[in-house]
Amino acid sequence: MSDRYDPTDRDRFTFGLWTVGNPGRDAFGGPVRPTLSPVSIVELLGEVGAWGVNFHDNDLVPIDATAAEQDRIVAAFRKALDATGLRVPMATTNLFSDPAFRDGAFTSHSPEVRAYALHKTMRAIDLGVELGASLYVFWGGREGCECDAGKDALEALKRMREALNFLTHYVKDQGYDLRFALEAKPNEPRADIYLPTTGAMLAFIETLEHSEMVGVNPEVAHEHMAGLNFTHALAQSWDAGKLFHIDLNDQNGPRYDQDLRFGSCNPKAAFHLVRFLERVGYEGPRHFDAHAYRSADVEDVRSFARGCMRTYNILRERAEQFEKHPEIQSLLMEIRAGDPVEEAQPPYTSGKAAALKSRTFDRKALGERALPYERLDQLTTELLLGNI
Amino acid sequence: MSDRYDPTDRDRFTFGLWTVGNPGRDAFGGPVRPTLSPVSIVELLGEVGAWGVNFHDNDLVPIDATAAEQDRIVAAFRKALDATGLRVPMATTNLFSDPAFRDGAFTSHSPEVRAYALHKTMRAIDLGVELGASLYVFWGGREGCECDAGKDALEALKRMREALNFLTHYVKDQGYDLRFALEAKPNEPRADIYLPTTGAMLAFIETLEHSEMVGVNPEVAHEHMAGLNFTHALAQSWDAGKLFHIDLNDQNGPRYDQDLRFGSCNPKAAFHLVRFLERVGYEGPRHFDAHAYRSADVEDVRSFARGCMRTYNILRERAEQFEKHPEIQSLLMEIRAGDPVEEAQPPYTSGKAAALKSRTFDRKALGERALPYERLDQLTTELLLGNI
Amino acid sequence: MSDRYDPTDRDRFTFGLWTVGNPGRDAFGGPVRPTLSPVSIVELLGEVGAWGVNFHDNDLVPIDATAAEQDRIVAAFRKALDATGLRVPMATTNLFSDPAFRDGAFTSHSPEVRAYALHKTMRAIDLGVELGASLYVFWGGREGCECDAGKDALEALKRMREALNFLTHYVKDQGYDLRFALEAKPNEPRADIYLPTTGAMLAFIETLEHSEMVGVNPEVAHEHMAGLNFTHALAQSWDAGKLFHIDLNDQNGPRYDQDLRFGSCNPKAAFHLVRFLERVGYEGPRHFDAHAYRSADVEDVRSFARGCMRTYNILRERAEQFEKHPEIQSLLMEIRAGDPVEEAQPPYTSGKAAALKSRTFDRKALGERALPYERLDQLTTELLLGNI
Amino acid sequence: MSDRYDPTDRDRFTFGLWTVGNPGRDAFGGPVRPTLSPVSIVELLGEVGAWGVNFHDNDLVPIDATAAEQDRIVAAFRKALDATGLRVPMATTNLFSDPAFRDGAFTSHSPEVRAYALHKTMRAIDLGVELGASLYVFWGGREGCECDAGKDALEALKRMREALNFLTHYVKDQGYDLRFALEAKPNEPRADIYLPTTGAMLAFIETLEHSEMVGVNPEVAHEHMAGLNFTHALAQSWDAGKLFHIDLNDQNGPRYDQDLRFGSCNPKAAFHLVRFLERVGYEGPRHFDAHAYRSADVEDVRSFARGCMRTYNILRERAEQFEKHPEIQSLLMEIRAGDPVEEAQPPYTSGKAAALKSRTFDRKALGERALPYERLDQLTTELLLGNI
């Protein structure tokens, strides 16, 4: 069955090797699915219609592989990319699984661990660039603490900054055409992770030496874990010119990191997200950082991957309908009606300020203007449900 | 009973008129305590030993007061300040109670409402400065939405920025010695408030025309409502040179805004907060933005106010003990031990990067180094409990 | 415009006087809408197509009304009911607004307050029965604490039990045909409310003298505030024969009590809820315990009320489609396939147990059976979105 | 160093094999500590002063062990128990790790899986009883769903009930002196787990055939994950005569399951918990279901275990001080003052009801009585901090 929601290259849908390749291990049980080779994952992604594939260094090359092994693996992977037409838009480093990083990588108290984290990241950047990545994501899963007595958050920020500065220098020095995207998460696996929200990351970026090459990679689940509105986080990122990448999935509020199929928990929140991306003209990849339920077998993993993309395309269609729906548009015009007040318009002048300060306002009338948001939201819900 | 925890002027403890003056109204019931006049509140604060008092414009002067009424009120207030020796370090605007602001003030769709919000804020700034405030707080309680279909978050950010730019111009134009502090809150009374965390505010500030005069006012309860570590938010604010003010209270995680007595919900989190402020040498006011339980009468409101200050001073003493405790300090030294790795130290050079990339690391050894955080955290707990 | 989603009497849609009558007051601002008289609210509900109206005693009769005033109010209300054809299926007591109840009603430390709470409830029961109610709801908004040092939870449970026992005796003694439904909420306006979940209420009911006449009134928002699956709470209530009433609204996870328009936050969770009610054949009222946004005027309150009912009817249609959808039903059959294992079937016998204990299982095969939940959930999402 | 907080047998402190034996694996990284044999864990627990040790069947005996291997393992374990003087008060079944249980054990759709779960549990019960357990815990980590379309919650409850009925019959049939304790958890590793709170479990127990032998095992972290007050859950369990066991640890609100060292996150909440247990005279084991940070080595695991017990004993001492503190006790008397109102006292009579209905109350006076909870809570905090 093929229809207008089938993924196309224009959609720029990507998955990480670790997403469809996730074997279903969790904190309370071991793997339930066979471990797929990177080549098999690329083939699976090609089959379901993805446009690209992303990876952590150790998704592709085991942490203890020899140089020769790495070469063989990379060659096979490249061949699979060629065969399927997939590309690698993004790469990242695993700085969280190895026991060496159990108290952080860039923020570890150990200078040796921090140095190893830089070493590992430079090598992983080389690998990512070699395979075509133009974006490099940083998720610092262990950059946090359980015990505030033992780790100084100020020092951690300083160390994080030094590491990122080092690495932006490295990228420029190598002449790589590569940008960085920082990904926030409030907690898990640490009790508290530093720079816990997209907002915090945006602020941190402004303290970097090459802030122009560093943006964010907001993830739906991670903002929802803090009870935050993901679309608002996107808006702030876009407003700052920093929406370099996005991690699409779903999550039911503050709890463990669920990484659910895109749109599967709350399709209305997903609708607003898609509407935002499409309206502003976001042109980066739509990356699904999700994984199938632990109950799934490989066939159901395929359904999972297809479902992520299909729901995106359905919601995009709805977003287009929203922009054209007569009553919705008429309500929006009503809600937004009103003539500009000249004294309040930029640029500021002393004269405007004085005039504005002495202006009289009809507070009561302002409190009574119609704002039919209930009507608008109900229409939006019905449009989402395919009823109008 | 008087002891070493009694508040002194050196402590710079402040309360808002709205805190001890809160009559106990909530979403499910009306006031339970008499409404105290601003003068009575100042007297109460003087009596319990506060150093200063803050206010929203309409805490002091009713929104519909005439100029003459305002003069009388301000004169009486000033007299009470003189009598008690209290000062006004901070002022702010109520842009959330009046129905005119029910869909936002600076981010309202109505140009007239936005203009009124500027008008009201300029007048409130004048009032604050007249009474000695050197800091002006912005909490945009209605700057958010329930219905993402109806309000464009990008446009809201743009409007918020224009308003703050206008007001920084105004302050400079008036020659006021006044800085701004932006206060974040994730939700309540709106479903989602824009710029929901201190991190988001710090990022937003960097987009302002006079960002140097704008900092943050982090509030314990507001970060806890997003499940975030408050001390980490303080650290990022301090790191950015933006910790202009602080709202101390307590809150038990994601739920309605509790504004509990400082340290009363989780004294351990409060300990780390106090330890941070004292270590970095924060010199601003310690403002308690809390209110007594709805069960309290005015006498219990006094206990509430005294309790906030007393707990702070107890925790400060503990923080000093922490810095001197032999085993704690020895554990910290152990945890932080390690020689710098020269190649990883700034400044970056190509040579260092190359050396670091080819360096060999003993991953296993790094994974096995001792990190006695359980021991350290247990000692910290016992120190907090007064046992060591 | 009229269509198949218009409310009919068969739908049994009800609203509380306090829902559409809510004037938009919240913790940060006063009323924004005119206070509607009970008669006007009944007329509004009649106009939008509701089947019934519920009330707290003081929604209808002010707490300080004289007997004569009460008679006049009740007569006018009854006339409005007759004129519109609405009925009163449920009534309840306001035991949370008055300062007398600020530390609880049935669980207050004051014997006088507890007696007054019984007094007020008996009178409110009389009023409810007089107006036709066959169900009486108990929501103990102040039955909790902020300070665990001051209120003994064991004693509180005992007092709650004594109050309910007293009142069930009273109802029987009066010969009323009335059942009770207990409504849980985890917090707000108290830091912690006793019996915080529907599950806790179900357990508590079993400790009552006339437990057979006491059931539950689960509310969507209240379970979501604890991050719980509302449909699962319904299932446990139904399983226990205790689903006497229901409060429909919406809520975005742990935060302040939002009471949003039904289905407006998460239509997928609402779909499962509706599917559950319709499948089991729940025949009680569908009560919307929600209120319009504070931005709404009375016209938008009408849109709000219509939207609650309309979304329910749309979701009911989808639930019917779900039961008939060939691929969904075929997946369900596949997921549920398997022959009963006789030894594990009730009734227990020693022989079965012995046989079962020595039976051999193919653990590996059990771990590999197909469970295509991703496919099923994606189809459910597309059905919800009106795409299949 | 030895002092009055050292654990003694009177304290009845227990740990699960899986707690101090936890190798530090989590969802984002593999083990960091050596896997300790059951014998080594018993030795470690003996060394730190625990009174008992609990286990899941597969903590002790691998799921694929032969009968001969089991015998050898059990003999060695028993020898270690004898050597250390530890006992096994509780045992439980691992029904969550094996892929066979990935969609539930007792609630699986597969009759074969359900039968296997009974088979495995009977064998594990035999093993527990053989080693002296008098209590058997059920935590159904996989008894839930991600996809409400695929699993019927009503049916799940029915299956859970049948399984527990089967197993109570089995225990009686075998003549075992064993009680069951059901442990609730709201989510993780499933999106939603059935019977998510202690309250829900208490209600469910009432639907069992041998409810008298089934109680609850409340866990601090699991209630906190739902934002609930743990002490209130204890109170309801105790009130129902169902507090058969307890899992002590700590957790910072709704987020992933942290299983932190007892009292380490919020010592004030832990204080109320200990005060409750000691006041009511709970005589069961104090079981610490926690694990050390992933940063810990085995030495730090010892500190973790010692810390759990030590904090309990410190808090017990504080609880005793609370009961004797003059001002605290005087405040409690003031708060609780008031003469009984005879008409409101059980037993109910028509006459009392009539008298109570016509009684006049001084609402205003009731709203003004003093309730100095702020003072009381501040004293409690200072007592907790060792200052009074």
Image: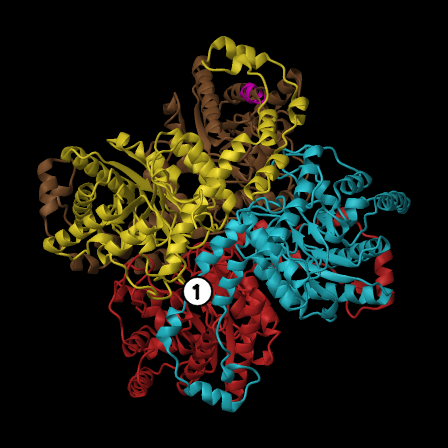
Chain colours: A red, B cyan, C brown, D yellow
B76 relative to D147, above or below: above
Residue B367, percent across and down?
38, 70
Q: Residues within 10 Å of mark 1 (few under 14, many from 20)?
A: many
Can residue D77 be seen at all in this image of the molecule? yes
Residue B184, percent across and down?
63, 57
**Quadrant of the image containing the C terminus of chain C:** bottom left
**Was residue C112 drawn as part of the magenta stretch in this picture?**
no
Residue D283, percent across and down?
35, 34
Determine whether, in the image, residue A170 is placed left or right of residue B105: left
The front one of C284 and D303 is D303
Can residue A318 be seen at all in this image of the molecule? no
Residue A66, percent across and down?
30, 85
- Parent chain of label 1: B
Main SS, magenta region, reads helix
Q: Residue at x 65, y 69 (%)?
A: B240
Counting labels gives: 1
The front one of C340 and A120 is A120
Determine whether, in the image, residue D130 is placed left or right of residue A296: left
Determine whether, in the image, residue C368 is placed left or right of residue B278: left
Kindly identify which residue carries mark 1. B371
Magenta-drawn segment: C113-119
Three-letter amino acid code at the position of disc 1: Leu
**Was residue C116 drawn as part of the magenta stretch in this picture?**
yes
Q: Tell me the SS state at disc 1.
A: loop
Q: Residue at x 88, y 44 (%)?
A: B79
C87 relative to C331, above or below: above
Query: Outermost residue toward the top?
Result: D351
